[in-house]
Image (cartoon, rainbow, N blue to C red):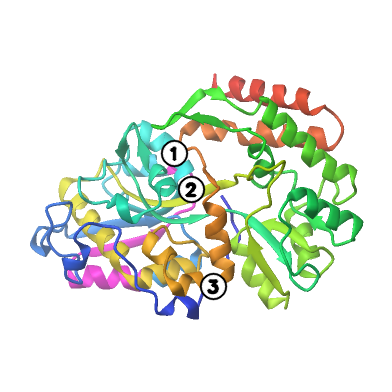
Amino acid sequence: MMSKRTKVLAAAMATMMMASVFVGCAGDDNNGGSSSNGGSSSTEYADKLVVWDHLTEDEHNALDPIIQQWGKDNGVEITFQNDQNDMQGYMDAAKSSSGPALYFGIAADNLGTGQKAGYLEEVPDGIIDESKLTESCLSAGKWDGKYYAVPIAQECIALFYNTDKCPEVPETMEELVRLAKDEGLGFEYDITQTYYSYPMLSAQGGYIFKDNGNGFDTSDIGLGNEGTIKGLEFIKSLIDKGLMSADISTDKAREDFKNGNTSFYISGAWDVSAMKEAGVNFKVAPIPTINGENPKPFLGVQTAFVNSQAGEKEKKTAWALLKYLMSNEEVSNILLEKGSRLPVNKSIIESESFKNNELMAGFVKQAEFATPTPNVKEISYVWDPTNNGIKSVLQGKATPKEAAERIVSDIKDQME
């Protein structure tokens, strides 16, 4: 969902061991090994394999030699291609013999259309060790109780605060707003966008689609409820207090925090490097409570999956390569250092090396209160109506109640 990513983590992760996501990886050899759970001996691998990724250019370039070496070691000619098209583009290509057998690194909220159309291969039994991964990340690749995608990384937004001006993070949003307004500390973020303002709506009880524990009920839209209305009232109050303009952009909010004009800013790990380079002394923490409730930003989960339209030999080869990538410590470091992506493996999150990196640990702490972005195709119908509804409130063109009702109505119209 986010386009700008930068380096976040370097030396702190250099010694971190990548605990395998997959069952039995520790016993496999460096070439992917043989396995009854999707692996294969090299003699059973396909001669050629097409792999796509949806990562940044830096990540792609860093992963390429690792993937090519695995191919060389296993007698597989691998075409590794960076792809930035939408899911329809993948499905069009998946039908072709030259299409990708493995897709590595795409946000789960993009997968709904492809999964529903049958273009994602079900993950074989035993591939995922549920005990090693966070529950919310696991759910991102799950539909109707079955796994079709494997989580490889996660991301969410949190609160940046300038420690020179505010040494301790405020415990509540009410206190943060007071400091920002009355003490002149300042608070800005891209309030016009659903992605950034959703925590204010969810803290009060708003939600996109109802999570029924085994997926999302898209007929139950929670953006017109009382919680969403309260959230819209809250973000309107930030404009009324003069903390930011109704048309503020991400660039403006970022630059103001970077230059010390504001002390509070909401964004993701992709902005950490720029703040460090600018010499800002800051920390990252979960967004403070609103009316005693925790804001719940979207949890984006990067996933990998195998093309169900590929040949059986290509599928086996793809699973073997994926197992290798997920057990390779260097791959984990690349996603962290080049892509600012948080780990999904509990052993990494709980390691002392990771905990000692306060900035990244701050995002993971926020992730505990985050809501997985719905992994259904209907999520594509949510963004524009909700963005428009938020803007209408901020600009004084609609009351929060009117805007909430319009948001739901417009989403339903698009879904129909």
Per the model, the C-alpha gap separating discs 2 and 3 is 34 Å
Mark 2 secondary-structure assignment? loop
Tell me if 245 is positioned left or right of 329 in this view: right
- Residue identifier under label 1: 88
Magenta span of residues: 64-89
Write down the quadrant of residue 35 in the picture: bottom left
Comparing 115 with 226, the one in front is: 226
Comparing 304 with 347, the one in front is: 347
Magenta-span inclusion, residue 266: no
From the image, state whether disc 3 or disc 1 is nearer to you. 3
Neighbour tally class for label 2: few under 14, some 14-19, many 20 plus, Cα within 10 Å: few
Is residue 220 placed above or below 288 in the rendered structure? Answer: above
Is residue 36 placed above or below 362 in the rendered structure? Answer: above
- Residue identifier under label 3: 357
User: Is the Cβ of the residue at disc 2 closer than 8 Å to that at disc 1?
Assistant: yes
Neighbour tally class for label 3: few under 14, some 14-19, many 20 plus, Cα within 10 Å: some
Residue 294, image x, y percentages? 63, 45
Viewport quadrant of the C terminus: top right
Comparing 174 with 121, the one in front is: 174
Residue 197, image x, y percentages? 69, 44
- Residue identifier under label 2: 85
Residue sitting farthest toward the left: 43
* Count of residue discs: 3
Per the model, the C-alpha gap separating discs 2 and 1 is 8 Å
Tell me if 317 is positioned left or right of 85 in this view: left
Mark 1 secondary-structure assignment? helix
Q: Residue at x 50, y 70 (%)?
A: 355
Is residue 53 placed above or below 350 in the rendered structure? Answer: above
User: Is the Cβ of the residue at disc 2 closer than 8 Å to that at disc 3?
Assistant: no
From the image, state whether disc 2 or disc 3 is nearer to you. 3
Q: Residue at x 69, y 62 (%)?
A: 160
Mark 3 secondary-structure assignment? loop
